[in-house]
Amino acid sequence: MTKIRMAVAAGVRTVTLNRPHKRNALDGEMIAALEAAFAHPPAADERVAVIRAEGSAFCAGLDLTERAARPHGASPIEGMLATIERYPLPVVAVVQGDAIAGGNELALHCDLVVASAAARFAMPLAQIGLAPSWPLVKKLLEAAGPAATRAFLLLGDPLPAARLYELGIISHLAEPQDLKRTAEAVIERVAGNAPLALRAMKAVLLRAMAFREQIEHADVDRLVEAVRSSRDAQQGMAARLARRKPKFSGS
C-alpha cells in the first residue's frame, strides 16, 4: 500500500496521507515522501496544492514506535514541514478528523485549513514527556497567537475545530457531511485567482515572517534535545503506546 499518494489534475496537486489503520501516523517513509511531493517547483499550469487524508483521522503525528527508537536529534518532520511551508503556491489542508502533534503542525503549516466540525487539534507533547522544537513553536505562534499556543503546549488537551475557527486559527469550518463540498469550493476559488498574484502573495507572506529566523535559539535547542533524551520522554512514549498513564520523575 502506498502510504502517500500524489496526483495532479486541472491545476491542483493533491497529496493524500494513506495509512488509515495507523491514524496516518507519520513514519520515516511518509515524511520523506511528503517532502519529495513539495520539494520541486510546481509546473506552470499548477495553481494550488492540497493535503488530505484517508480514514477517520487526519494525522496522529509522528509514529511513536520509530521516535522512541531514535530519541536523539532533530525530527525529520521539521525539514518536511518547512518544505511544505515554502512551496511557491498556496497549500490547502482538508482536515476530516483529528490532527494531533505533528498532524496539527502539518495542517497549520498550510496556508488555508478547511476542517470538519468533528475534527480536533492538539499538541499533547507535554503529556508524553516531549517538547516541540523552535521551528514548530514558531509556527504555532504565527498561526495561533500566544494565548492559544500556551493552551496547546502547556495543557496538551485537544481543541475542537470550531474553537480554532472562532480564534481565527483555521480558515474554514464545515459540518462533516459538507466538508468535501466546502473544500472543493475553497480549492476552486484559489485555483481561479491570478497565478502570478498567488505566487507573489505567498512569497510576501513568507518574507514577512522571516524575521523570526534571526532570533538566537541555540540555548532553547539544547533544552529541547535534553527533554527528547530524558527518561521521562522514554517513559511517556512507552506509556502512550501501551495506553497507560505515565509516571514522570523529572529526569
Image: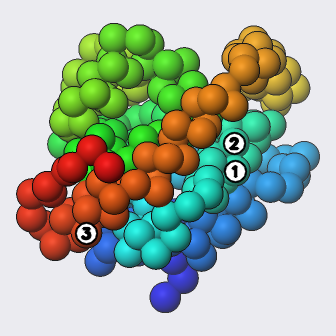
Q: Quadrant location of residue 188?
A: top right
Q: Secondary structure at mark 1?
A: helix
Q: Residues within 10 Å of mark 2 (few under 14, many from 20)?
A: some
Q: Quadrant location of residue 62?
A: bottom left
Rendered location of residue 50, percent (x, y): 58, 48
Mark before the other along the chain sequence, 3 or 2: 2
Rendered location of residue 18, percent (x, y): 45, 72
Lateral position of residue 50 relative to residue 114, left or right: right
| CB under 8 Å between discs 3 and 2 | no
Report the coloring of the rendering: rainbow
Q: Secondary structure at mark 3?
A: helix
Which amino acid type corresponds to the residue marked 2 in the rendered image?
Answer: Ala
Tell me, yes or no, if residue 57 can be seen here.
no
| CB under 8 Å between discs 1 and 2 | yes
Lateral position of residue 75 relative to residue 195, left or right: left
Q: Residues within 10 Å of mark 3 (few under 14, many from 20)?
A: some
Q: Is residue 120 above or below residue 34?
A: above
Question: In the image, what residue occupies the spot 41% across and 11% down?
Answer: 146
Q: Which residue is mark 2?
A: 82
Which amino acid type corresponds to the residue marked 3 in the rendered image?
Answer: Ala
Rendered location of residue 243, percent (x, y): 12, 67
Question: In the image, what residue occupies the spot 46% across and 52% down?
Answer: 228
Q: Is residue 52 above or below residue 6?
A: above
Question: In the image, what residue occupies the spot 58% across and 30% down?
Answer: 220
Q: Which residue is mark 3?
A: 238
What numbered label is drawn on residue 236? none
Of the pair 180 and 210, the residue shown nearer to us: 210
Mark before the other along the chain sequence, 1 or 3: 1
Q: Nearer the viewer, mark 1 or mark 3?
A: 3
Of the pair 150 and 231, the residue shown nearer to us: 231
Q: Residues within 10 Å of mark 1 (few under 14, many from 20)?
A: some
